[in-house]
Amino acid sequence: MQRLTKLSLGMVSIGIMFFLTVAPYPTAAVDRPGEVQITSCSTNFDPALYEDMVVWITKINGTYGVYGLNLETGRSFFNTADPCRKKNPQIYQDVVVWEDMRNGNWDIYGYDLATYQEFQITKDEKDQTHPAIYGDIVVWEDRRNGESDIYGYNLKTHEEFLISKSEGSHYTPDIFEDLVVWHGYRNSGNAIYGYDLLTGQEFQIVDVTWSFDLVLSGKYVVWQDYDSGNQEIYAYNLSSSERTTVFRDLWRWEWSCRSDPMTLRKIAAYDDTVLWASYRDCNYDIYGYNLATGNQVQITSDLHDQFFPALYKNTAVWMDDRDGNYNVYGYDLDFPVVPVWLTYEKKVTLLRLSYAAFLVFFAIGAGIIGRKVKPLQNLSEKPVQVLKRGPVSVVAPAVVSLMFAAFSLYFFESLVLYEANFSIIVTILSFALISLLPVYITDWCARTPYILMTDTGVTVLGVWGNVQRVKWNDIQEVSVQKKKIDIFTEKREIIVWLSVLSEKEKEQFVRRIKDLSESADIPLHEET
């Protein structure tokens, strides 16, 4: 009964690891109050949001146009559509800016919703991309100097100015109030940098591994990173200098849902709320995280893809292909959303616990197997002296076991959690089993003496059940060294490692061997 219970616990722990690593999350119904379809024809992408105004790019009959809709009043707008590509619109109050390819390179254009006037912001022949706007300031990524720099433009004074004044490449800026932030790659590595428009001072905010898709929202800088080899989302609090892990999902087995590069498909943030699109259910869904409460929610659960979210206060919009082409949908976050109970942190905790249960299960098994091995049962005569193993020989395997288990847990965390596939799972489990070998050795050494001396000879009990017996009258030569004693017979050599014995029992054995050599006239070589 006990064996069945232990076997059941082991199988349950393995089953939990399998489920947490492979099983998809449950999905919920999609037709619900609070959700609204904003577009219904053509191809619509890259939505952006400010207050009640949603803007996006529409591709229809080979032409591109910037469109918008006021969700409160129903007022809509669009600028003249043309065959030249447009993307990445951004909006603040009555001004919309976007990337435009009409001049043969990417330029930044703008549109005033109050005056219905379009205007050009950049005119350089190199590419200007990734615009962001706040107040009267538009910032963007600019390649006019070869490497990427960050430039700005004042809509009131019509003045253009350079923001990133250091060497290196600078990408994907964002702006909030008087602060501009961007990704920078310099000789010192990757980092997120900031620039104060009032003081003209540039400063480094935080080191990153490989960041992209940066958002500045109030006191938070939010970005995607590859800190552990897969996509993650972090938030940095500019007030407290604290860094928070918003999202880090576990990659799937190779034959299951596995995230593709840039899997999170853009992030959005407003105040304490962060949105992103995750591929955890074999399709993209929109998820959210509250930086103040630490709660994660699932906003969409349709079997089709929803990605590229935008957020303003409690309104979220995104791209959606549930109708067979890309449309823009929206949702009022004041309506109920689905809490995500099995967040990354809880998932990792359960995985660690199940893995620990797996180790404990096999440790118990190793102990049981060890107790089945009884090397003393075949002795033909009763020993007159028993020399036990010293504490070092018992403790050392236990330390080795803990080291192996620690390495096993480290590799489990760094590989299985982030790049799980069948071969890695087998490798880690095999390594875990190997790590339990010292458990067996420790238990065996604690119960089994090292040397048994009888009236007729000596028996040395090795760790692997290797029992070596030699009769006193068969010994032809003895070599006593600091760490070991070599006992030679006509056919073989037996090595007794003195470090296995305690100091007291080491002296007893050496004295017995010397007395035997002297009484039986056996040659003895002693290392001085």
Image (cartoon, rainbow, N blue to C red):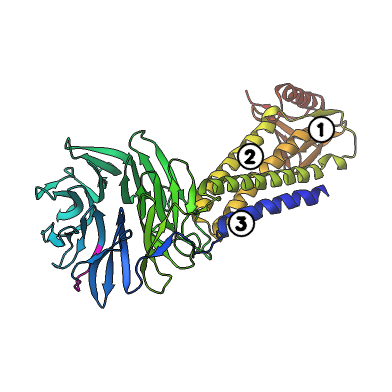
Q: Is residue 158 above or below residue 514?
A: below
Q: Is residue 100 visible?
A: yes
Q: Nearer the viewer, residue 228 or 177?
A: 177
- Residue 117 x %, y %: 14, 61
What residue did someone put label 1 on?
452
Please report the bounds of the magenta region as a residue range. Answer: 81-87
At which x and y percent is residue 271? Answer: 36, 44
Name the kind of residue labelled 3 in the image. Answer: Phe
* Residue, far right: 381
Q: Which mark is residue 18?
A: 3
Side of 379 relative to 262 (left or right): right
- Depth check, front residue: 335 or 522: 335
Distance CA(mark 1)–CA(mark 2): 27 Å
Residue 513, picture quadrant: top right
- Asked if residue 16 is positioned above or below residue 456 in the image, the reply reads below
- Whole-angstrom CA distance, mark 3 to mark 1, is 48 Å
- Would you name the residue on which mark 2 appears? 401
Residue 521, above or below 195 = above
